Amino acid sequence: MNQNQNQNQNQNQNQSQNANMIKNPKPPYEPQVKGPAMNDRDRLNDLLATEKYLTDSFNVSAREASHQALHQDIITVLNETHQCQYDLYQMMFRKGHYKLEAEEQQKLDQTFQQFSNYSSQFPYQGANVQ
C-alpha cells in the first residue's frame, strides 16, 4: 500500500469514528492552548476527582459500619455524593469536556448475548439466594 492509500484509509477511519461521536461544542471562552492558570475545566475536573474519592471512601465506611443508624446515614451521604458526581459529569459533558462514542446496535446485541451466556456459569442458577 502506498502512502496516499494509507492516508485515505486513515481519513476514512477518522470520519467514521467522528460520525459515531456524541459531543457538545466547547465553550467559546475556553482557550485553544492551555496556560498555567486554572480554568473552569480544571476546577470541574478537580471537583469530579474529589467526588470520586469521596464515593470510594464512603463505600468503605458503609461496608465497615457496625451501627445501623450510622450505616444508614453513611448510605444517605454516599447516595448524595454519587448524585453530585453524576451531576458534575453531566455538566462537563454539556460544556464539551467529555465525548462519547456511539456503538452500533449489532455490536451491542453481540455483547449482550455474550454476557447472557455467562449466566449459565453461575453457581446458583434459578435458586433463590438471600
Image: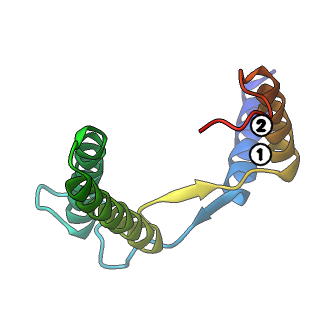
Asked which secondary structure carries label 2, the reply is: helix
The residue tagged 1 is 12
Quarter of the figure with residue 102: bottom right
**Mark 1, other Cα within 10 Å: few <14 / some 14–19 / many ≥20:** few
Along the line of sight, the residue nearer the viewer: 123 or 96: 123
Above or below — where is 31 with respect to 33? below
**Mark 2, other Cα within 10 Å: few <14 / some 14–19 / many ≥20:** few
What is the x, y in percent for residue 80? 32, 67
- Amino acid carrying label 2: it is Gln
Is the C-beta separation of discs 1 and 2 under 8 Å? yes
The residue tagged 2 is 9
What is the x, y in percent for residue 77? 26, 63
What is the x, y in percent for residue 128? 71, 38
Q: Residue furthest bottom?
A: 28
Q: Give the residue displayed 78% in from the left and 23% down from the top.
A: 2
Q: Give the residue displayed 86% in from the left and 37% down from the top.
A: 113
Q: Give the residue displayed 20% in from the left and 64% down from the top.
A: 43
- Amino acid carrying label 1: it is Asn
Above or below — where is 54 with respect to 23? above
